[in-house]
Amino acid sequence: MPVTFKDISLKEYNNDNLKILGELRKELLQAPVEICIERAVLITDYMKNNPEEEKFPQLFRAKAVANYLKNKEVVFPDKSLLAGTTGSKFKSALLFPEFIGLTIWSELDTISKRKKNSQLLSKEDARKLNLDVYPYWIDRDVLSSTKKEFGEGTPIRLLEKLIFYLTGKGACISHTVPMFERVLSEGLDAIVAEANQKADEKGENEEFCKAVAVVSEGFLNYTARLSDAAYNRAKTETGIETKKRFMRMAEACQNVPAKPASNFYEAVTCVWLCLIAIHAENMNIAISPGRLDQILYPYYQKDIDEGVITIEDAFEIIGSLWVKLGDNVNLVPQVSEELFGGAGTAPAVTIGGVDKDGEDAVNDLTYIMLRVTELLKLREPNMNARFHYEKNEKRYRDRVAEVIASTKAVPAFYNDTSIVKTLKNQGISVEYARDYAIIGCVEYAVGGRSYDASSDLLLNLAAPLEMALYNGKRFKTGDEDFGAPKTGDASNFKSYEQFWNAFKEQLLWIIKQGITLSEQMAVIHQRRVPTPLLSALFDGPMKKGKDLVFGGAIYNSSGATHIGFADVVDSINAIKAIYDDKQYTMKELISAVRTDFKDNEKLRKYLTEVPLKYGTKVETDNGVSRELIKLLHETYQSYTNDRGGVYRSSFWSMTNHAGHGKMTHALPNGRKAGLPFASGITPVSNAAKSLTECFNAVAALDCDYMPGGIALNIKFTMLKNEDDAKRLGDFVEAYFINGGLQVQFNIMSRKMLEDARKNPDKYPDLLVRVSGYSAYFNDLSDSMKQELIDRTEYGINDGKAVL
């Protein structure tokens, strides 16, 4: 795809001549978050009034979602060029009672008043939830249904303690990338016609096909009403430009998604409307738009060639989409806010890289999207730049680096060569592997062909470590017995190998519990929350006649990510040093850890300074990091999920490394109780004294053992000019040549972040990269802020750590 721009930075397009972008950004950032109960009320009402339909779960859910879409309020809350909203508010927190909506039941009177990240709920809406909605769902949400079906055994008990693992399945059907190409090229009418035809054949897939048709028709009803409402606004508005804006919306919604998109504006509108519909069915946690610069490019180029739009028009249309992607946030109960607050919905947009033939896919739209990202500096979408060091031009690499310097946080870089290799190793065809997109934080998907469920298990690796130290118990849970293996009193272990075997036994046991729970919840998904609309936007379900939750996608996998990787690796290396050096005994170590190193600073200093540290060459060659990565990979790959796919291990942590660190006692690496863990796959702060050593250590872990993705967080003090951006690009390219998968940056010093914590009003919308996604610094918990402050800083000139 030829790039026609002479100046790929597109600096001539700015906030002075693209004023609509600034206005949209200001509107979005200033809008309060309001809890929208409209969906919960309409879906609950339908289900309460039609109980006889419950024996046909796919059709029952389709009709309930269609009922919501047919009655969903049409609002135009902003000056956006795009019609449609996720909820009924300017910025909505939609409530999904079938998933985690009931978690705020005890907070209905307080959630509007909390100090940080309040979510506004009117007294009338609270009353409706309390009296009309929640009583129906009290034993019907996913978690309650799992307990009812499988009992409150060990897997549930561990989940409810929060400190062992979490599961995404209890909260959503998400973490995936749908396919928009068929809707764009054929229209939703074609999908409805196919579904009706297959339903008429009266085969075993009749219910699924009917469900697709029913929910799609509900979607089309909503877009038709959008068109009518926009047309009526066009008639009543007095301003010429406003009239034109509403008329354009009306005409687009009259055509898409029912019919094929005929131009760029309609194509972008269609993508946005499809996302609205998907969120009518599924909570928006990392449902990601995918490779938009590839999907939308043919429509853009056609309109540019024919003079239908200008470059300025394209900027405003893409900018409107970027802002729209932030019109919804997740409902967050108080405990989640305190431990993991600040997370967005993480809709990931992927740009650049290579095409299905392995050739350079960077195009003009890639650079427009980079410039829009640079101008808006928003949390959503989560921007990700693919880079193939042999196929993509260096000027593209350096332009991505410039945008990172400007935004201080986005995009993240992804290595096409390593990721394509990794996906091929997972059985994905090379053509599809080259077309990968990023899900949510950092996970890999083949848009619309692989249903990846990449957040099925979020495992705190400190749990099996402590259980190996304390004979199957965790420090925080005391003597409570969860049925874990009794691997013995670690203070009596005679060798490091004895401890490693105990750790391995505890790790395999807890993985088994987490996967058991994931599979139990999968059964509940099939019975209570199938997803026919999302299935209609995939390649596979219509051919197989199966919903995604039954294995309808071409490729099916589940994901398990890990929290505390670096701290646990360093802790195991410290235990090995205890046996090798013989300066201290295991009994002394365990006693010091139990007391949080009280009156034992000498031992703590030894643990922080002497043992091998992950992030260094000597640890790579002689430590435990590679062995642990391989063990996790092989363990997960031995499991088959309910849809016939395997589990993939990954290493990203959102804000969980701060929350889980807060709930975890002291560890053998010298880390004191309650402190945040290192994020994702990132070494512990100041372990790697140079960026090159850090990159080499992470790259040496072998990309094939991390098929679910990684989040490597690097902090630079400052990038001052184009030369600095090129140096960043050089660092990234060298890391990728060595096999690294991913890296993301914060361009900010410790001093700046400390000032932002003390003076939040000076930094109202400071964008930071957390562990896979972006957030506003002021929205984060205190422990997460501290973790960002404490991250190792590197100098751009020499790549050395700034201590």
Image: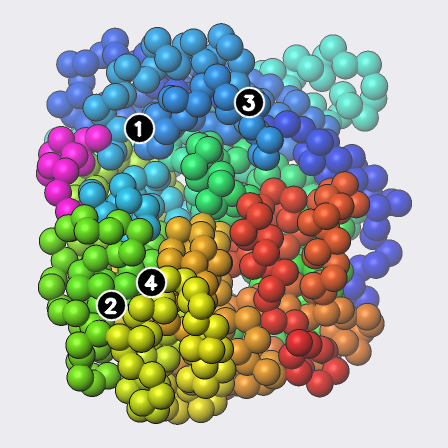
Q: Residues within 10 Å of mark 3 (few under 14, many from 20)?
A: some
Amino acid type of the residue that numbered disc 1 sits on in the rendered structure: Glu
SS type, badge 1: loop
* Residue ID for mark 3: 112
Amino acid type of the residue that numbered disc 2 sits on in the rendered structure: Leu
- Looking at the image, residue 158 sits to the left or right of residue 604; the answer is left
Name the image quarter holding the C terminus. bottom right
Q: Are marks 2 and 1 in contact (CB under 8 Å)?
A: no
On residue 98, which mark appears? Answer: 1
Q: What is the C-alpha distance between the residues marked 3 and 2?
A: 43 Å
N-terminal of the pair, mark 3 or mark 2, is 3
Amino acid type of the residue that numbered disc 3 sits on in the rendered structure: Ser
x, y percent for residue 15? 84, 46
Secondary structure mainly formed by the magenta segment: helix
Quadrant in the picture for residue 206: top left
* Residue ID for mark 2: 469
Query: Mark 4, mark 2: which one is toward the viewer?
Result: 4
Magenta stretch containing residue 152, yes or no? Answer: yes
Q: What is the C-alpha distance between the residues marked 2 and 1?
A: 39 Å
Q: Residues within 10 Å of mark 4 (few under 14, many from 20)?
A: some
